[in-house]
Image (spheres, grey):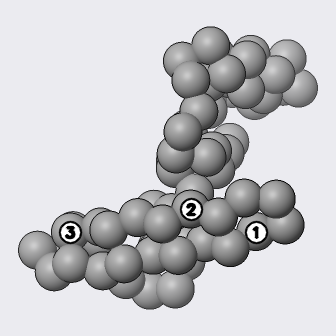
Amino acid sequence: MVICIPSGITEVEKRAVRDSAEHAGAKEVWMIQEPMAAAIGIGIDVEQPVGSMIIDIGGGTTEIAVIA
């Protein structure tokens, strides 16, 4: 299972997310930060040494990240 998480999430919160996914039956759990998932989703090659600014404006949060 791949789960997108906010970039500011704490280790305790990450553990709670992982535990919830495992309790729901996930055999493997991968967590990816939301800005990175957004970049991949729109086709940015995140492995290239080119800077890209990602702005994720959601219902309750806004995240800004520079990925290079």
Check disc 2 and report the residue beneath it: 63
- Depth order, front residue of 43/14: 14
Marks 2,3: beta carbons within 8 A: no
Cα separation, mark 2 vs mark 1, equals 8 Å
Residue 15, quarter of the rendered image: top right
Q: Residue at x 40, y 64 (%)?
A: 65
Q: Earlier in the sequence, mark 2 or mark 3?
A: 2
Foreground disc of the pair 2, 3: 2
Q: Residue at x 59, y 33 (%)?
A: 9
Q: Label 3 neighbourhood size at 10 Å, few (<14), some (14-19), many (20+)?
A: few
Q: Amino acid at mark 3?
A: Ala
Check disc 3 and report the residue beneath it: 68
Q: Residue at x 68, y 73 (%)?
A: 57
- Depth order, front residue of 35/63: 63
Residue 32 vs 38, above or below: the answer is: above
Q: Earlier in the sequence, mark 3 or mark 1?
A: 1
Query: Is residue 62 visible to us here?
Result: yes
Residue 59 position within the rendered picture, expressed as x and y whole percent measured from the top left:
84, 66
Cα separation, mark 3 vs mark 1, equals 23 Å
Residue 35 position within the rendered picture, expressed as x and y whole percent measured from the top left:
51, 63
Residue 45 position within the rendered picture, expressed as x and y whole percent measured from the top left:
30, 79
Cα separation, mark 2 vs mark 3, equals 16 Å
Marks 2,1: beta carbons within 8 A: yes
Q: Amino acid at mark 1?
A: Gly
Q: Earlier in the sequence, mark 2 or mark 1?
A: 1
Locate the N terminus and report the quarter of the image it occupies.
top right
Check disc 1 and report the residue beneath it: 58
Q: Amino acid at mark 2?
A: Glu
Please state if 24 lies on the left or on the right of 55 as rendered. right
